[in-house]
Image (spheres, grey):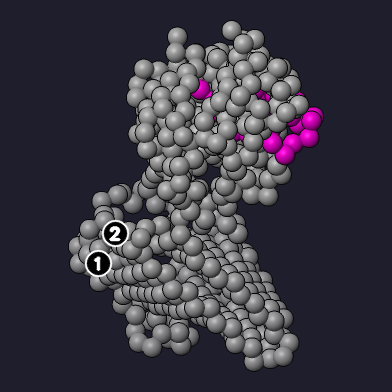
Amino acid sequence: MRSVKSVENVNYYQVDNEVRRIFSLEGVEVLSIVDAWEKYDWVREYFEKKPIGGYFVWVKKQIDAPISTCVGIASKKIDQNLCNLLVVEKNIKVKGSVFCFAFRKNLNSKHSVKGKILLKENSSIDYAHFHAFGFSDSVFMDYEFFLEKGSKLEYIYKNMGAPVFLERKMNFLIGENASVTNKSIIVGTKSNVKIFDSAFLNGRNSSVIMKLRLVGREKSTFDSSTQIFGKEESKGHLDCQGLIVDSFSKISLTPKLVVENKKSILTHEASIGRINEEQLNYLRARGLSEKEAINLIVNGFISID
Amino acid sequence: MVLLKVEGLKVEVEKKQIVNGVSFSLERGENLVILGPNASGKSSLANAIAGLPQYKIKEGRIIFNGIDVTYFSPEKRVKLGIVLAFQHPPAIRGVKFSSLLEKISKKRVNYFGFDYLKDRELNVGFSGGEKKISELLQVLSLSPKLAILDEIDSGLDMKMVERIGEIVRENLTEKNVATILITHRGDILKTVKPDKVAVMLEGRIVCVSKNWKKILEVVKKYGYEKCKECRECELLSS
């Protein structure tokens, strides 16, 4: 197992179901969610039942350091059931990152998360979320983002080798003058991926841009349903693109726009393509092997803004 | 010393024979220009020598540096020193021109004053001239022994043709790199000054001469069809 030293900068570090390290800075309270549940009554509003694992991060003052949380799986057949709560107080701007991973590829474990992110008035967060599990793991994500008036979320999710099963559900509840930019990159390798993302433009002048880049490799299956509900005067855009690398992978994209207010403007674009033979041969004629050429094309595809 | 020997090459594209038995050889550092009208099989010959999979070799052999490379993959041919500048390079979204060049280059990349292309996505929105420059820079980055330049001058204004001709001359021909330059117009020959010129018609080489000026003169006056019967250039070269 890697030493804790290699993750010195994290504020919260958990391996399997054991909390290994908690580090709070002045102005930020970091606890295990179990302790937070006991300490603060209001935490209980966010979860149906008492959590058994996960973190609580409460940013109360402006800080320079980024918020980092790290959850790893080191043992075989572990069942992680996490409830995470991140709260950013009014007018505070922070950067955060979440890193969830398996130490080895063959642990056959389960990572299940209910995450709640609360951005209070005029706060903002640049939030990067990385997943790196083993091929035999199963991952269930259920996240809710609550954006109060004037708050801003920049959220990027990267999973460059999705496990055998990944189910992701995300809800963005966006208030007045609040905005969300979300880009998700998922590369499947023998993976079955299900995505249910929804953005609710609940406040006047709220906005959302949701981008999805899915890459199907090695017999992967993606089933993605992404939707925006324009409930007030608002703007939303969905941009879903899939790239199929092998002959056996399958990608299904279902974008849905629901306008419930005549001043809500919602748009979408969606496309699914295969690796282009012409591009592949072109790169091979530059000395790259077929595998190197595919990797370059895939990396190019996922970097498209 | 012979670098490339093409023997009785027949090439099919989508089950249609395009190259109908082509033979020629090229010495180390020698520069051959292949002239011919559109659809005469020039590009198919170039792509077959570079090993692109959609160009199926039905008969014949390609010997490079003493090795039979007829059925080698394109990447293996590049490693041996055969590099092709594409006539119509595909655009690849998200891949920066500079990142490809840095990945393939064996030496420090020289952009020859075209540094502004560095951060552009590969061939995305490139003008005709930018595509040609991009191809040439990629070829130079791979330090070839044989550079095949397919229509490196097409669709360019005279000033750009001259600039590309200079880069080819200074960095390939004058550095003893063998070149096959494919063109259907002759302007670039004035800058490049080839060792010999071949004319290709209907998938065959119908004339080879060292007198490129004479060939251009004949073509200009009578058209390529004349090269089937006229033996003036060959006589002059011998």
Q: Is residue B108 visible?
A: no
Q: Are marks 2 and 1 on the same chain?
A: yes
Residue A80, quarter of the rendered image: bottom left
Pointer 1 chain: A
Residue A188, relative to residue B200: is it above or below?
below
Position of the N terminus of chain B, as image quadrant, is: top left
Q: Are marks 2 and 1 in contact (CB under 8 Å)?
A: yes
Magenta segment: B146-169
What's the chain of the residue with tag 2?
A
Q: Quadrant of the C terminus of chain B?
A: top right
Q: Report x, y in % for residue B100.
A: 54, 39
Is residue A51 in sight in this rendering? yes
> Amino acid type of disc 2?
Gly
Residue B46, disc: none
Q: Could you say which quadrant of the image residue B221 lies in?
A: top right
Name the residue located 71 percent from the left edge and 23 percent from the top edge: B218
Neighbor class of circle 1 (other Cα within 10 Å; few <14, some 14-19, many 20+) is many
Q: Label 2, label 1: how many angstroms apart (C-alpha)?
A: 9 Å
Q: Is A103 displayed left or right of A266 in the figure?
A: left
Residue B174: x, y in percent? 62, 13
Relative vertical location of residue A41 with respect to residue A279 in this rendering, above or below = below
* Residue at (33, 70) in percent of width and height: A192
Observer-side mark, 2 or 1, equals 2
Residue at 31%, 49% in the rendered image:
A3
The residue labelled by disc 2 is A134
As drawn, the label of residue A109 is 1
Residue B160 magenta: yes
A211 in magenta = no
- Is B56 placed above or below A251 here? above
Expressed as whole percent of the image width and height from the top left, the position of residue A11 reads 44, 60
Q: Judge by depth and name the residue closer to the eye, B41 or B229.
A: B229
**Pointer 2 local density, CA inside 10 Å: few below 14, some 14–19, many at least 20:** many
